[in-house]
Image (cartoon, coloured by chain):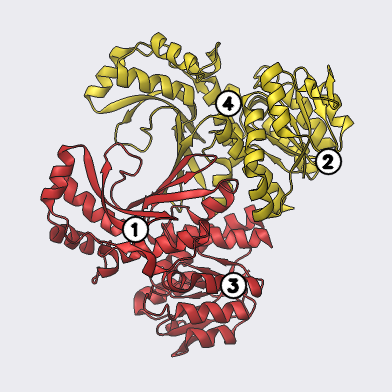
Chain colours: A red, B yellow
Amino acid sequence: MRLCLVGFGSVGQGVAEALLLKNKFLKKRYGLNVKVVAVADSSGAALNQNGLNLEKLLKIKQKTGKVSNYPNYGVEGVTALEVLDEIDYDCLVEMTPTNITDGEPARKLTIKAIKDGKDVVTSNKGHLALYFPKLMKIAKKNNVKFKFEASVGGAMPIINFAKYNLPSCSIESIIGILNGTTNFILSRMASEGSSYEQALKEAQELGIAETDPTYDVEGIDAACKSVILANSIMELNCTLEDVDITGITNITPEAIDLAKDEGYLIKLIAEISKDRMEVSPRLVDKNSPLAVDGTLNVAMLKTDLAKNITVMGRGAGPLETASAILTDIINIWREK
Amino acid sequence: MRLCLVGFGSVGQGVAEALLLKNKFLKKRYGLNVKVVAVADSSGAALNQNGLNLEKLLKIKQKTGKVSNYPNYGVEGVTALEVLDEIDYDCLVEMTPTNITDGEPARKLTIKAIKDGKDVVTSNKGHLALYFPKLMKIAKKNNVKFKFEASVGGAMPIINFAKYNLPSCSIESIIGILNGTTNFILSRMASEGSSYEQALKEAQELGIAETDPTYDVEGIDAACKSVILANSIMELNCTLEDVDITGITNITPEAIDLAKDEGYLIKLIAEISKDRMEVSPRLVDKNSPLAVDGTLNVAMLKTDLAKNITVMGRGAGPLETASAILTDIINIWREK
């Protein structure tokens, strides 16, 4: 299986590291021989039809910031779209930054790969939240696999979870914590009594929050994920505009203390159902399965036959997110 | 897909009810048309190559206790093994009571069906805990599917969870609560201050514990499930004899109170790893994801890439267990 990786930030590098770690495992367990034939970042790309040396590539990226510095096979200034025409590959692994304005460059890259008959795995939320039904339709029409487990919940399985583990059930609602950054901030505020600003600063210093934390703290990231879940596992046809969103920027230590006195925590909860699409801070009983701390994600699926099923796991982290991307790659391979 | 159901107690009847409820759903979503051509219980069987009326069959079973009273197509005294020769079917759904002495009648039924080239789905733990590697080998040799999600955790996905959701990960250990009856008893002791005997009696009155609760309260049920998980998702070749088992019969309300004062609960914990196979009462931090109450089951999988992933759900109940059996049936259908 020849992969083309586009986007080589923390998730992309995580995938490269995971492939190095699990190379033998994948061969032995699944007979899956993965070869990375191209890696593109904003600087250009490294392309080798015989497969790139990922160890070398990671070192070069970490040292110089550019994959185009890869010796002999690095090309500066080439765009990812051009790379897709340059190389023979089987599966595009799309990991560019989420863009909720127009979903680019993920949208164009995904559509091109699909139309070229390639399978696509993505960790990106933007194009999915904006154009889910359209992208699915194109993938179906072109008879390719399009998978996106890593776009929601990091290492926490949720999309494949519903598909493979609850196929007999109608999923009536999902309630969960889908954003690790805000959960970290709220957890720190609760445990340390810190202000929102202090907790955000700490999260930024630890690399858990971005310099511009807007997407996370305003609830937009969780809302994008809610839209992806609604479309993919609940067959609700909706977009970002359908979600009522309230972020956590107005939560005070006093509110958290007050809740605590009554046995509750304040969490940024996503609720997805036919009647309600909402991301907002809510009171959660401290003994509820939803009361998870730190950067953990959690989702409680309310179903008809199995009743409530809950899953939790790390919502972020390079190797953790890579594990979800590899899951999709392995499932594509097994379903061939 | 023509099913032959063997065993028509609470789980078997749950499957019949679930099929009635989800008949249209299965057709619409998966193009799967399920027909039950035979149902066997200890009285005999009902067989109809054109499909049995499950509504009628459930009524007769509930009224008379015997499926052999099904009009025209009921046969008294026929054994399940004979039924497998009488009827054309695609998949055996084996739901006889667990027997950890010799695994019968599940073992013989399963082997016969497999050798006849039929797929098998089971909720039974006995033959799996005693003969796992052997049964897998025969299934592989005969190129049939043999699935057993319902044997561990009821509605809580765990076997398919590891296979489909964590295929990129090595699972280093599993720690969890795999028995709902004992978890109910311990939860009641903690919340009500009742003695072990009182809580057991209450569980029996609610149908959560059996008249002879030995398998559950001595930890044998959880140990069987541990063996199934060890073999199926951790590739450890072990049997029931390899598990250190301690039950909950000696737990006192005083011990529970003492633990509570320090912020702990006492839970019957199963630990499965290369170095340790153990079922025993342990202290669990009340804020741990493992601190689930009532008949809930929970499993925390420690993995290399995804780190800790936790799943929880109802460990028992007819429709809940049926959901796991239907999952296996649907996955067999999709993998054809």
Task: Name the one closer to the observer, A1 or A163.
Answer: A163
Name the residue beneath numbered marker 2: B117
**In this figure, which residue is indicated by the disc labeled 3?**
A137
Badge 2 amino acid: Gly
Task: Describe the element under mark 1 as helix, strand or loop.
Answer: strand
Between marks 1 and 2 in the image, the one whose residue lies nearer the viewer: 1
* Res A226 quadrant in image: bottom left
Give residue A213's mark: none
* Both marks 2 and 3 on one chain: no
What residue is shown with label 1?
A278
Marks 1/2: CA distance? 50 Å
Q: Provide the chain ID for the residue under circle 4.
A: B
Residue in the foreground of this view, choosing between A320 and B156: B156
Instruction: Say whether mark 2 and mark 1 are on the same chain.
Output: no
Q: Chain of mark 1?
A: A
- Location of residue A175 with respect to A17 vertically, above or below: above
**Element at label 4:** helix
Tag 3, which chain? A
Tell me the CA gap for discs 1 and 4. Answer: 42 Å
Q: Is residue A315 visible?
A: yes
Q: Which residue is mark 4?
A: B224
Query: Where residue B103 sits: x, y (%)?
Result: 70, 22
